[in-house]
Image (spheres, grey):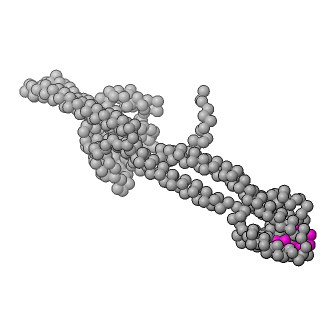
Amino acid sequence: MARYDPWRFVKGFLPRGLFWRSLLIIVTPMILLLGIASYVFFERHFDETTRRMARDVAADVAFMINVEDSYPDKERAALRDREKRVMQYDISFDRGAMIPAAARKHRLTSLDVALMDVMTETIGEHRPFTTVHVGTEIALRVQVHDGVLQIVVPHERLSASSADIFILWMVGSAIFLVAVAVLFLRNQVRPIEALAYAAENFGKGRTVTDYKPYGAAEVRRAAQAFITMRNRIERHVQQRTEMLAGVSHDLKTPLSRMKLQLAMMGETPDIKAMRADIVDMEHMLDAYLEFARGEGGEQALTTDLGELVRDAASAAANARRAGAERVSITMPEHIEVSVKRQALRRCATNLIDNALKHGRQVKVSATRDERFIRIIVDDDGPGIAPDRREEAFRPFHRLDEGRNLKAGGVGLGLAIARDLARGHGGDVLLDTSPQGGLRATIRLPA
């Protein structure tokens, strides 16, 4: 039973690269911290500071209202002048004016809300008043017994100026920290990208000579392990190739002596049969060595794919003594790829030879997209059943139906082709051809 992953939906929106995931891990807590700090500052500290400053203003206003309601009209003008000098407000009086009671309900900003709440607590709910913003100042209009008293209050006496500085420091520090995180993460991710690039090129059969471990200790250990693994594989391939070269020499030497001895004998049916057996033995020996040798120590070079495929088709046709009309080639212009030329040529030759062996007409084509380069070989032969296609790649194995012993070979053509394709980081795939036979596709990474 499949296990349900509750985070599967979220994973679809997460970045796939290590750099962006690491940056997200750093930036997300930072944004949450800044959000919480901003909430605490504005909802707690800033709001409380604003209300305290509003209470001071409300106390001054309550004092001036008391003066207006308590002193005679002749003395009030002089007292207003004194209040202006001492309290540093712009104070004016509009005799006979009235403030509608409904005017108190028009609240514009959070500062108005704080000021009106404090004013209501200080001067009472039944005295009409209103606030009007005049530029950077707030005009507070309060109803007294014979008119309206207007006090213009500077904005800095009601709101803490540190809010702008706080926001500036928060945003500035966040940008600085993100920039430092980006630079740090880029330097940490670059060694991993270099290791991935080296491993990818090695998997495609390309030479990696200038790679050196660097970065964090864990990345250095992984890189050193990769280099050790690469050296072991290359040493193993080299030792195997040298051993097989010796085996080839040791086995072909007695075969050559046998051929020479048979050539000096008379021409009899038995001698002819023995010569044919020796030829078959040489052919099988060459096939075994070709399979075991694989791609050898060949270096990857930039190659024109069309030229390579035409050479392979020509070699396969000549080996089969097949006419050029049996093979048709359709290749796009200028497909260049970095490959081991002789290895890929041998891979394509084996597939085309296999198609000529079992079909009358062979079509060779190539395609390229963002991910893969494909060399496609179609024939009109008997084909291979879908459930036996993977079996066809087994070394020294020949299928009983369609492609059997009568067709010749030692059962290594497809195995060698797949081995060479995989040495380039690709593969060989089998499918049904539109011509009715077998479609063999060499798929290489672009």
Report whether residue 61 is seen.
Answer: yes
Q: Is residue 279 above or below residue 158?
A: above
Between 333 and 184, which is closer to the camera in this rendering?
184
Residue in the picture at 87% in, 75% down:
75
Q: Position of residue 357 (x, y in %)?
A: 33, 37
Instruction: Confirm whether the magenta stretch covers residue 146.
Output: yes
Residue in the picture at 77% in, 58% down:
55
Q: Is residue 205 above or below residue 402?
A: below
Q: Main secondary structure of the magenta part?
A: strand
Residue in the picture at 72% in, 62% down:
158
Residue 292, quarter of picture: top left
Magenta span covers which residues?
143-150
Residue 125, quarter of picture: bottom right
Apparent side of residue 442 relative to residue 93 in the rendered image (left or right): left
Instruction: Confirm whether the magenta stretch covers residue 301.
Output: no
Q: Position of residue 134 (x, y in %)?
A: 74, 72
Q: Position of residue 49 (x, y in %)?
A: 71, 55
Q: How many marks?
A: 0
Between 216 and 275, which is closer to the camera in this rendering?
216
Report whether residue 359 is seen.
Answer: no
Can you name the residue that lies furthest to the left here?
Answer: 264
Q: Quadrant of the N terminus?
A: top right
Q: Position of residue 276 (x, y in %)?
A: 20, 28
Between 432 and 202, which is closer to the camera in this rendering?
202
Between 24 and 194, which is closer to the camera in this rendering?
24
Residue in the picture at 20% in, 26% down:
277
Residue 105, quarter of picture: bottom right
